[in-house]
Amino acid sequence: MAKPYKIPDFRKMYPEASEEVIAVLRTSERKMQYQEYDLKRARNIVDPKTGEKMTIPSREDSYERLQEMAVQFPEENRSVEDQILKKIECEQLHKFLLELSKDVHLQTRRQLSFMPCSTRRSVRWNWRKN
C-alpha cells in the first residue's frame, strides 16, 4: 500500500480478473487499511450543540508509542506459594484426565463385549485403523 485511504485501481492491475475478484480485492484492501490506519488513529469530534472539541483516543496503540509516553506495565509477580499451588493443580488435573481416559477405554471395552461377534470385529477393526 502506497498511501493510506487510496485504494489502488485493481482493474488496471489485473485486467483479466472477473468483477467478483476485483470486489474481493477492494474489500480486502479496505480491511487492511482499517487495521493499519483507522484503529491506530485518534479522532477529533466537535459537538454540534456546544461547539466543544473532543478527542477520541485510538482503539489500538503501538508498543513504541506507549514507550514514548513512558507507560509502565504492571509486572506479574506471583508469590512462590501461588506458583507451587498452580503447579500442584496442573499435576492433579493431568492425573484426573489420565484416569478419565482409562475409564472411558474400559467402558468402551465393556460395551464391545456385549455386542454380537461380527459387530465387535468391525468396530475393533475400525478403531485400530484410526
Image (spheres, rainbow, N blue to C red):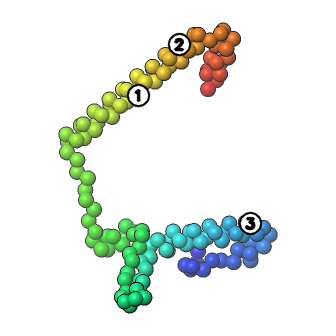
The C terminus - image quarter: top right
* Real-space Cα separation, disc 2 to disc 3, in angstroms: 56 Å
Disc assigned to residue 110: 2
Q: Nearer the viewer, residue 64 or 103?
A: 103
Q: Amino acid at mark 3?
A: Glu
Q: Nearer the viewer, residue 1 or 25?
A: 25
What residue is at 28 percent from the left and 69 percent from the top?
A: 71
Q: Amino acid at mark 2?
A: Arg
Residue at the extreme bottom of the image, as rendered: 51
Q: Is residue 79 above or below residue 67?
A: above
Identify the secondary structure beneath mark 3.
helix
Q: Amino acid at mark 1?
A: Leu
Q: Which residue is mark 3?
A: 20
Residue at the extreme right of the image, as rendered: 16
Q: Nearer the viewer, mark 2 or mark 3?
A: 2
Quick one: label 1 or label 2, which is nearer the N terminus? 1
Residue 104 image position (x, y, % from top left): 48, 21
Q: Nearer the viewer, residue 95 or 56?
A: 56
Q: Quadrant of residue 15?
A: bottom right
Disc assigned to residue 97: 1
Identify the secondary structure beneath mark 2.
helix
The N terminus - image quarter: bottom right
What residue is at 32 percent from the left and 74 percent from the top?
A: 68
Residue 42 image position (x, y, % from top left): 41, 78
For the residues labelled 1 and 2, say whether their Cβ atoms are less than 8 Å apart. Answer: no
What residue is at 66 percent from the left and 9 percent from the top?
A: 117
